[in-house]
Image (cartoon, helix red, strand yellow):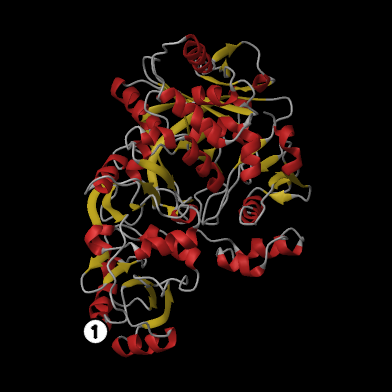
Amino acid sequence: MKLDDLKHYIKVIDIPLDVNLEIPHLAYIEAKKKNPKILMFTNPMENGKKFDIPVVMNIFANDEVVREIFGRDLEEIAKEIESLIKMKPPKTLSEKLKAFGKLFAIKNTIPKRVKDAECQYHIYEGEAATLDRLPILKTWEKDGGKFITMGQVYTKSLDGSVRNVGMYRLQVYDNKRLGLHWQIHKDSAHLFWEYKKAGLKMPVSVAIGGDPLWTWCATAPMPPGIFEVMLYGFIRRKNPRLVKCISNDLEVPADADIVIEGWCDPNEMEIEGMFGDHTGYYTLKKPFPVMHIKTITTKKEPVYYATVVGKPPLEDKYMGYATERIFLPLLKTTAPDLIDYAMPENGVFHNLILAKIAPRYPGHSLQIMHSLWGVGQMSFVKHAIFVGEDAPPLRDYEKITEYILNHFDPENILISKGIVDELDHSSIKELIGGKLGIDATKEAKGIDIKILEDKKLFERIKELDESVEEVKQYMTHTKNPICVIKYKKTKRAREIFDKLKALKKHLRIVVFINTPETFNPYMLIWRVTNNIDALRDIWIEEIIGIDGTNKDKNIDEFDREWPPDVDTTKEVIEKLKNLGLIEGISEEELRKYQVI
């Protein structure tokens, strides 16, 4: 697929805009619209200099665009994968012919090396290979600099037997060096350690653009050792076309728009960050490997793909949904009674999953919880809620929430300890934190709760503690109503929680925050799932308490640095408004998603 194939979904912005903040801010707002478009910025600028290369953002703009990129329904691809997993030795002629067709599909996964490639039309080597020819963006005001955000990073093992591509952010240190944000759990980081142990330099190549499916494949959670481009061939039903790089022996997509080639010295590390990340918080500064650039190649008329991350909803909502659908059959191999699952984007994917299962015996849901927490990237999931076969569709969030609260019983909660994503900021210890599993497959016992009006409840709670500023109740018609309490954080939430036990006839689940989401359930889920570590922040006593506040070193004795929110720059938003570029989205929606 070429970008031209998506022209009906592209909105062209010809007004000159700066690569620093202005372009990414407009893309950030576009992604929050009801029907987002792909944006092409034809006049990217910096300090009065115009770049020759257009910037393309929000390439996975919406469900319809994703369908176009994949070329067929996601469910069709998933069923094809499932049929391969379940394939049995054929007995009859018709079964043999069917099996042959399936095996032929596997043949398409084998990469094909080509000699001449459009990605090498222009070749810049030595002193000519500089990053300033590319319209690389600075997305957020507090970012440590410019970052490549949609690069396919190609690496291979020391002996060449394992090849890998992942999508990792790359900080621009200067014209010839990039920071490689290889999180400790990622495949490229594992390969990196092979070179470090051997004391050898590691080849690295970064491809940008080309068929958008390459970019999605770079994010796909493939089993270790399987080259992600094979998935590209399976979906496209044709062999992936790769070309050998000019200055190293890695192979990249022949149709890439831009390729950056180089190497890294495993003994050289440099501080990378801060960076406004997909969690909606900044990732803090930390040392990472450095890539030295030798060669840059491009198409005849390249474009530069970039993505923007921050508070949801964003483009990763649609990329994540494709991953969720296509990889369901693989998850079922470890949890056969898993019917379906969903990773809501405001749960930032790894912070919350909903899973529909068919429990057949006591403890079955616990078994599935543990099996999922041991599978690849699912092992980073912090909070998992399991519902039964009779539950409504998992993406009908209003109805599924009601179902969960009517099936929630404190006796069916599992809190354990495990690994967490390196981007998680709330765990007691970096990389290790609490895991919460809720078995909501059986209807809960009824508990007599006398619901008070919000105003009356606020007065009663305020009498107990003056620091309380707002109270809002949700799902009061269910067996487990939720009460959200915003307070001025001069003490631990636990102190207020203990006082609230005096109101246990009126309360069931109490959530504490010290941020502005009290009346915004979408962002409330985002905030709380980000901010809690189940081992520290959930109390199951006479009532249930959840501490969703930002943690403080003095008040909470939280020893790690707490990162700031990812927020837009007011002056940039005002400029975009004055240029008439912010349209198709209401002020109410901009406030809801904390853009303004």
Does residue 146 appear in the picture of this structure?
no
| Above/below status of 60 relative to 5 | below
| Residue in the image at 76% along x and 60% along y | 579
The location of residue 391, given as percent across then percent down, is: 41, 54
What amino acid does circle 1 point to?
A: Ala
Residue 116 quadrant: top right
The location of residue 296, given as percent across then percent down, is: 60, 26
In what element is the residue under mark 1? helix
Residue 183 quadrant: top left
* Residue at the disc numbered 1: 502
| Residue in the image at 33% along x and 85% along y | 461
The foreground one among 254 and 73 is: 73
The foreground one among 378 and 578 is: 378
Crowding near the residue tagged with mark 1, few <14, some 14–19, many ≥20 C-alpha atoms within 10 Å: some
| Above/below status of 452 relative to 437 | below
| Above/below status of 385 relative to 241 | below
What is the quadrant of the N terminus in the image? top right
The location of residue 573, given as percent across then percent down, is: 65, 62
